[in-house]
Image (spheres, rainbow, N blue to C red):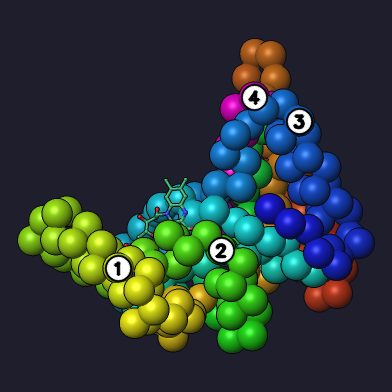
Amino acid sequence: MLFNNLHKERPFELFHDYYARAEEHGDKFAEAGCISSVDKANQPHSRFVNFKYFFEDNLIFFSNYESHKAQQFEANNKVSVNFWWPNLEVQIRIEGIISKCEEKFSDEHFQGREPGKNIAAIISEQSKEIESYELLKDKYQAMKEKVENGEYTESRPEKWGGYQIKVNFFEFWEANDDRLNYRECYSRDGDSWSKFFLQS
Ligand SMILES: Cc1cc2nc3c(=O)[nH]c(=O)nc-3n(C[C@H](O)[C@H](O)[C@H](O)COP(=O)(O)O)c2cc1C
């Protein structure tokens, strides 16, 4: 995850410190967070995504704008995210409001990705049913050949791009002996942040 123009308030700096420590301690998938969204029928859904940037006060990942999660974000823009870094025994809970990133930002990120990943982003109708995994691989291979022989130039499809979560809540949880765990929380309160502790 890249940190860019991160807000100077304490919870953002704390998140940055914990993230750096998780990487130092060898947590290989530190950028993976489980994001939960709620659909029109109030059913929650959770899945992991890779958070690629923390820009100002926004946590950012990339996905398909027609996927199940995309439909849920349309229905309800309130989301939560959970990071678990086992080597540190730290959990960080985040809540916020999700929206799409600017197109230019998504274009730039797309251009910097490995070509193979971009081919997958182009061919996949994420979350739609398909008869078999083999069919998905056939779609991928057909597009790969088109790109390789110059019939198709890789460019960001409109259906794929960034999502940013403007964070309004953090909980920093650290495991401790006898389940007397440490829970330090921050809640956005207008332009400032309220700090409080919760019992384990
Ligand atoms: C560690 C990990 C990282 C993932 N990163 C992403 C990601 O950055 N973007 C994405 O769209 N899906 C990612 N996925 C796949 C999602 O978990 C999910 O299967 C997919 O986005 C479809 O979700 P949906 O049907 O709820 O829209 C990741 C899965 C794992 C296990």
Q: Secondary structure at mark 3?
A: helix
- Residue at image position (30%, 68%) is 145
Residue 19 image position (x, y, % from top left): 74, 42
Q: Mark 3 is on which residue type?
A: Glu
Provide the residue span drawn in magenta.
79-88
Instruction: Give the residue at mark 3.
Output: 24
Q: Mark 1 is on which residue type?
A: Glu
- Label ID, residue 113: 2
Can residue 122 be seen in the rendering of this structure?
no
Instruction: Give the residue at mark 1.
Output: 145
> Are there few (<14), some (14-19), or many (20+) residues within 10 Å of tag 3?
few
Q: Quadrant of ligand 1?
A: bottom left
Can residue 36 be seen in the rendering of this structure?
yes
In the image as oriented, which residue stretches furthest toward the front? Answer: 149
> Are there few (<14), some (14-19), or many (20+) residues within 10 Å of tag 1?
few
Front position among marks 4 and 2:
2
Sequence-earlier tag: 4 or 2: 4
Q: Is residue 83 found inside the magenta-colored segment of the image?
A: yes
Instruction: Give the residue at mark 4.
Output: 87
Alpha carbons under labels 2 and 3: distance apart: 24 Å
Q: Mark 2 is on which residue type?
A: Arg
Alpha carbons under labels 1 and 3: distance apart: 40 Å
Q: Quadrant of residue 84?
A: top right
